[in-house]
Image: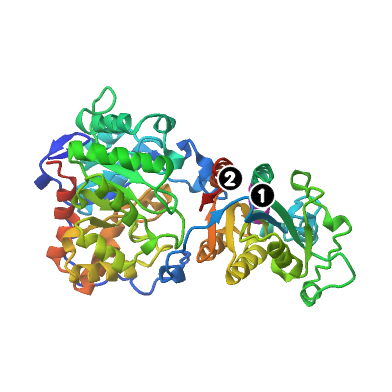
């Protein structure tokens, strides 16, 4: 048996000093389990974050143009691959939310007036959402009655109008889809959690800049009041909500 | 008696056994792939389908000391007992095949349609009569969840498995986690599954709670072991969950708490990138890396032998 079983005594040469590239999530090992979220059409909304042209138009958006100018296309290959996957799922989730009567709200980095934030100045992302940078791909254009909020920072809550929207509509849960998972969506969900709101992140309807970022941020986010489900699962859940009025996640 | 794909053997013949591995599988065959994380390319899916490569890997395993393996791929994503039989003969490794079903994305359509009783009859036949023209038999059942709760078709499978377990005596092995984090006590749904199975009259001693080392909580594991379950550290080598050294220290602690008879060890090898052909250790990682860690911590040869030989034999024994 090659002495493999039961002859211990010395640790393997690699023990304790290997260089790890694997993604681990140690904090999640010591945090208690989280309670389910109860979603109804009345207490939930769908947030589409940063799905406007600058981040979500792979041909003519600001990011696409900029990386080409800077000869950085390769660096963003994974993002645009992820975006292409996400782009198939966003309309599915959006369509289902509209069908079952869940409110829809958009939050997009940029401004609609002359005021820009220090963050926008620092990044140089001074997008005027009244112009071309405020466009959305046809598949998920806002409907006329759906709020479109300009946000001056990464989080949707950086625009106080979003918190007001939640309060005025007595919403307690936010289903989140969109782009810039590892920056804006992560920030939004953590802040929502801090404020006691539940978040349901649709794991394949959010795009991070890299695949590693997608895995790492998704798994780190999913604690406390933040949950992850795939598009397929969310569509099934929304069906249950439609039929039964409520669904536990 | 332990039911291998080549026929029954005496438990004393089993030898060193990895009780949760894949040998022949293809996750791309799952009928509800939309329930999986679609941002992962198909190239990362679980897939082992090169006969010659698998003979080589199993042979390397035998040369390292391995004698037996439980193949936990279920119907729905490539289970093939005829191929397993040929692999077993070629590599001279006992292979035990699995009845029951994996997580919802891989559950065949008929499971949604059939009653629990009909499903129980079906999987009972897979243990008692065999599958296909070759009539090769499975040796255990599997039940799985991919959400934080046991619900829907996955609950249906668990109920059917409970019925079939009581008829046959075969052990149940469980998949207790998806990629969810922190939604259930102790990080795995083994406790929920156990409670349901107990309420259906299944003895905890006939349950292997799997994947406990993806999100290990020693208090939960101790409680499960105290009830008589097998607790299976079966993703050894997958350090994106926890470090192998953490696993070793947890196993050591559980042994010192008196649970050595409840512990099983395995790797859940399931991708070509895990194999020697890809520069990795294949099914041999446990011998080359993990067991030496246990030894260094003071786990004795006899205790390791229990976990690698005696416990799998007891678990797989269909009385």
Percent of width and height locating residue B201:
22, 45
Whether B172 is drawn above or below B210: the answer is above
Marker disc for residue A238: 2
Q: Is residue B97 visible?
A: no
Percent of width and height locating residue B316:
18, 45
Q: For residue B298: magenta?
A: no
Instruction: Tell me which chain the residue with mark 1 is part of.
Output: A
Instruction: Tell me which chain the residue with mark 2 is part of.
Output: A
Percent of width and height locating residue B182:
44, 63
Residue range highlighted in magenta = A79-85
Which residue does the image show at 79% across and 54% down from the upper left? A53
Q: Out of B50 and B259, give the one closest to the viewer.
A: B259
Q: Out of B283 and B223, give the one closest to the viewer.
A: B223
Label 1 with label 2: CB-CB less than 8 Å: yes
Q: Give the left or right position of residue B127, taking residue B105 as reference.
A: left
Q: For residue A82: magenta?
A: yes
Lower sequence index among marks 1 and 2: 1
Which residue does the image show at 26% across and 69% down from the upper left? B293
Q: Quadrant of residue A163?
A: bottom right
Q: Out of B62 and B114, give the one closest to the viewer.
A: B114
Marker disc for residue A102: 1
């Amino acid at each position: 048996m090659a002495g493999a079983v039961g002859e211990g005594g010395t640790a393997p040469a690699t023990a304790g000093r290997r260089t790890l590239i694997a993604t681990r999530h140690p904090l999640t090992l010591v945090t208690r389990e989280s309670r389910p979220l109860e979603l109804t059409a009345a207490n939930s909304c769908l947030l589409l974050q940063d799905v406007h042209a600058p981040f979500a138009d792979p041909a003519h958006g600001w990011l696409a143009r900029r990386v080409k100018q800077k000869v950085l296309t390769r660096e963003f290959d994974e993002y645009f691959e992820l975006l292409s996957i996400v782009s198939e799922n966003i309309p599915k989730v959006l369509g289902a939310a509209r069908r079952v009567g869940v409110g829809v709200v958009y939050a997009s980095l940029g401004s609609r007036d002359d005021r820009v934030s220090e963050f926008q100045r620092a990044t140089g992302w001074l997008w005027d959402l009244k112009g071309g940078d405020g466009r959305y791909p046809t598949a998920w254009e806002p409907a006329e009655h759906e709020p479109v909020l300009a946000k001056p920072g990464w989080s949707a809550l950086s625009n106080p109008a979003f918190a007001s929207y939640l309060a005025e509509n007595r919403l307690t849960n936010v289903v989140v889809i969109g782009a810039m998972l590892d920056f804006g969506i992560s920030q939004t969900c953590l802040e929502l959690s801090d404020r006691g709101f539940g978040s349901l992140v649709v794991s394949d309807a959010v795009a991070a800049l890299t695949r590693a970022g997608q895995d790492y941020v998704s798994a780190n986010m999913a604690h406390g009041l933040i949950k992850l489900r795939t598009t397929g699962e969310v569509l099934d859940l929304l069906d249950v909500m439609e039929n039964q009025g409520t669904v536990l996640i | 008696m332990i039911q291998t794909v080549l026929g029954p053997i005496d438990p004393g013949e089993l030898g060193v056994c990895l009780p949760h591995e894949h040998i022949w599988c293809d996750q791309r065959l799952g009928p509800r792939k939309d329930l999986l994380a679609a941002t992962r390319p198909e190239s990362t899916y679980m897939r082992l389908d090169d006969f010659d490569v698998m003979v080589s890997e199993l042979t390397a395993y035998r040369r390292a000391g391995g004698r037996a393996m439980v193949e936990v791929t279920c119907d729905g994503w490539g289970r093939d007992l005829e191929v397993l039989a040929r692999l077993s003969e070629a590599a001279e490794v006992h292979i035990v095949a699995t009845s029951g079903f994996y997580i919802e994305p891989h559950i065949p359509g008929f499971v949604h349609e059939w009653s629990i009783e009909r499903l129980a009859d079906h999987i009972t036949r897979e243990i008692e009569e065999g599958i296909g023209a070759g009539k090769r038999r499975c040796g255990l059942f599997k039940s799985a969840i991919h959400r934080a709760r046991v619900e829907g078709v996955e609950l249906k499978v668990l109920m059917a498995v409970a019925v079939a377990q009581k008829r046959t005596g075969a052990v149940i092995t469980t998949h207790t986690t998806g990629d969810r984090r922190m939604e259930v006590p102790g990080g795995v749904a083994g406790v929920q599954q156990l409670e349901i199975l107990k309420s259906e009259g299944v003895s905890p001693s006939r349950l292997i709670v799997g994947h406990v080392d993806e999100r290990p909580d020693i208090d939960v594991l101790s409680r499960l072991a105290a009830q008589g379950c097998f607790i299976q550290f079966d993703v050894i080598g997958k350090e994106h969950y926890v470090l192998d050294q953490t696993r070793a220290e947890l196993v050591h602690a559980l042994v010192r708490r008196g649970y050595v008879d409840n512990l099983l060890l395995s790797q859940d090898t399931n991708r070509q990138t895990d194999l020697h052909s890809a520069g990795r250790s294949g099914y041999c990682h446990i011998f080359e890396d993990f067991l030496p860690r246990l030894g260094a911590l003071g786990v004795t040869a006899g205790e390791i032998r229990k976990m690698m030989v005696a416990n799998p034999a007891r678990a797989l024994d269909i009385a």
